[in-house]
């Protein structure tokens, strides 16, 4: 049992397990076989001595007591069998706290505790009343459902189909890899609209990549022309034209600069 508990607004916050156990214990306030037996004994002790209860009435009441006991034993046996069959299963437990908020706890039933005629499911080392059991889930179903949910959430985070660019390529490629790796059973969890939008993203990404490839091809010739231009400039730069006599180094630089500028034009 945990020795620590969260505190909020100066009060101890009960866990979902504690809320479940508290609810189960509250249901024990009804009449049981022990209370019925106590009433029968009290009736015998305080009966009117002048008009005592007949033996026939006592026998009838005792028969009722036996029936109640048998019914309770049958209910307890049935509840234990039901709880025991859940060991190893994936389940959802529905709990309600003191504020009335509902929360679902998901996990695997590790073992069952049977106490005072009540069965409790152990999930993640916490006990929950069998009465709070909401859903029993197949492991394959849960895995397929979660996979479809993650796929849909990732798809919804993408921008509009017409607004995607190469920055979204990795996400769409990952979605494509996941979708192609899904079984037909897992794909059945995807909505028709989700599959349609996914295909639109794949087609649009291919168009964006093709456009980016054409742009790269158009840039390469321009780079080659620039290199040729530089080559001409170097060849002209190595020409044997002599500067005018008497001209200084500054005039020589201007002459070369003006020639490169003209060729560039």
Image: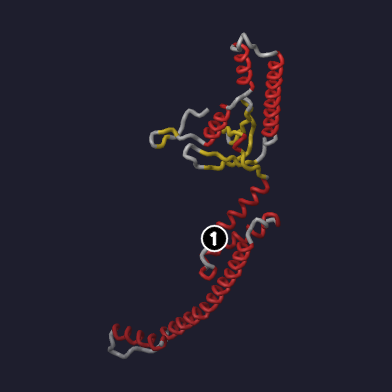
Residue drawn at x 57%, y 40% is: 94
Q: Percent from the top left, x then y, of residue 30? A: 58, 27
Q: Is residue 245 above or below residue 101?
A: below
| Residue at far bottom of view | 244
Q: Which residue is drawn at 61% across and 18% down?
A: 39
Question: In the rendered image, which residue does mark 1 sit on?
Answer: 156
Left or right: 19 as drawn, with respect to 178: left
Task: Tell me the quadrant of the picture where the C terminus can be found.
Answer: bottom left
101, 226: nearer the viewer: 101
x, y percentage for residue 96? 52, 39
Asked whether 155 or 84 is in front, the reply is 84
Residue 38 spot, x, y in % from top left: 61, 17
On screen, residue 257 versus residue 211, left or right, reads: left
- Viewer-closest of 77 and 237: 77
Describe residue 58's horizontal placement relative to residue 9 as left or right: right
Q: Residue at x 45, y 35 (%)?
A: 13
Residue 131 appears at what percent x and percent y? 61, 35
């Amino acid at each position: 049992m945990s020795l620590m508990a969260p505190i909020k607004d100066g009060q101890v916050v009960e866990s979902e397990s504690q809320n479940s156990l508290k609810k189960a214990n509250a249901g024990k306030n009804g009449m049981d076989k022990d209370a019925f037996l106590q009433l029968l004994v009290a009736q015998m002790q305080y009966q009117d001595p002048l008009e005592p209860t007949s033996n026939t009435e006592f026998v009838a009441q005792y028969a009722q007591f036996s029936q109640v006991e048998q019914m309770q034993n049958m209910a307890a046996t049935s509840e234990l069998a039901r709880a025991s069959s859940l060991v190893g299963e994936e389940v959802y437990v529905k709990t309600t706290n003191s504020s009335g908020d509902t929360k679902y706890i998901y996990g695997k039933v590790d073992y069952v505790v049977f106490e005072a005629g009540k069965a409790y499911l152990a999930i993640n080392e916490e006990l929950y009343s069998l009465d709070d059991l909401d859903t029993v889930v197949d492991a394959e179903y849960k895995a397929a459902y979660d996979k479809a949910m993650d796929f849909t959430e990732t798809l919804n985070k993408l921008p509009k189909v017409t607004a995607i660019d190469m920055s979204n390529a990795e996400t769409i490629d990952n979605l494509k890899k996941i979708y192609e790796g899904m079984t037909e059973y897992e794909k059945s969890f995807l909505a028709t609209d989700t599959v349609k939008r996914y295909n639109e993203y794949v087609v649009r990404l291919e168009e964006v990549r093709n456009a980016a490839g054409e742009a790269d091809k158009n840039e390469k010739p321009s780079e080659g022309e620039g290199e040729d231009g530089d080559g001409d400039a170097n060849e002209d730069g190595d020409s044997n034209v002599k500067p005018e006599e008497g001209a200084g180094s500054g005039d020589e630089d201007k002459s070369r600069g003006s020639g490169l500028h003209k060729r560039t034009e």
